[in-house]
Image (tube, rainbow, N blue to C red):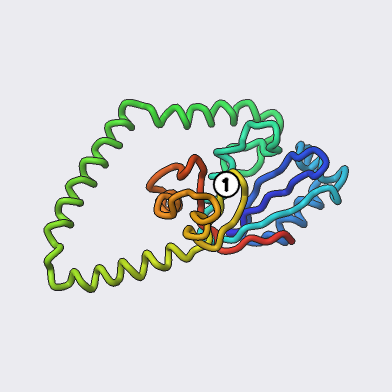
Amino acid sequence: MDTYRATNTINGKFYLGSSNNFVRRREEHLNSRKNLPFQNALRKNPDAFEWEVWHDDYDEPVLEQALLDMWFGKEQCYNLNPYADRPSPTFEQCSKSGKQHVERKTALFNPVNKEKVLEGAIRSGRNAVQNRTGIHDPRHAQTVEETRRKNHREQSKPVMCLETSTIYSSSSEAETFTGVDGSSIRKCVKGKRKTAGGFHWVAVTAGVKP
């Protein structure tokens, strides 16, 4: 998936999007006649926009959604929809979309959902106990080696800090330059924790500015 950001260098505002074909999607934006804030600004002064694109191995707009969760509703963000997997709404739909976004966030604190989270935590604890009983299994050495190789591959994958949009060649490099624990960064990438060192982190394949 290609996740992109088009930044208006005049006022610093930006638009977030994603596509399986960034070049085609950018052309669609440039030729669009929609009456939307981003499209209007782009038509008025297309040369003022700087385009950035990041590639990842996801089939869904995971990175775009993470960025929208952080920036949607703020003055710098042109986007009118808080969800990456839906088309941009009209001006008339904006207020309704905002309300749905709040309702979706509020649902996380529903007592029923809270019970499900607790049940999941209990199941995870049981699985951990069961896993520990197999430590002395003859196949354990092979499992450990496979895990070691997997961890090495994960440590070598490029990661991006969402707050700064800085891409590091690995979690180890990110730890060197930021001082944030590399294992905590990898847990963020896997979705096991929300932040590391006060920042949000995601995995990417490459970052370029076309």
Secondary structure found at label 1: loop
Residue named by callout 1: 162
**Left or right: 30 with respect to 75?**
right
From the top left corner, tell me how far across and down residue 62 is, in percent: 52, 50
Q: Quadrant of residue 20?
A: bottom right
Viewed as shown, does residue 98 lie left or right of 142? right
Query: Residue 94 is drawn in which quadrant?
Result: top right
Horizontal and vertical percent for residue 108?
40, 31
* Residue located 28% across and 36% down the image: 116
Q: Where the C terminus falls, by quadrant?
A: bottom right
Left or right, 27 with respect to 59, comes to right
Disc 1 packing (10 Å; few <14; some 14–19; many ≥20): some
Would residue 59 be seen by someone viewing this image from the given angle? no
For the N terminus, the image quarter is: bottom right
Q: Front-most of 76 and 182? A: 182
Identity of the residue drawn at 20% across and 45% down: 125
Q: Is residue 126 above or below residue 119?
A: below
Which is more toward the observer, 116 or 191? 191
Residue occupying the point 63% across, 31% down = 73
Q: Position of residue 148 (x, y in %)?
A: 32, 68
Q: Nearer the viewer, residue 116 or 139?
A: 139
- Where is residue 208? Give x, y as percent: 68, 61
In the image, taking residue 180 as reference, residue 24 lies left or right, namely right
Q: Amino acid at mark 1?
A: Leu
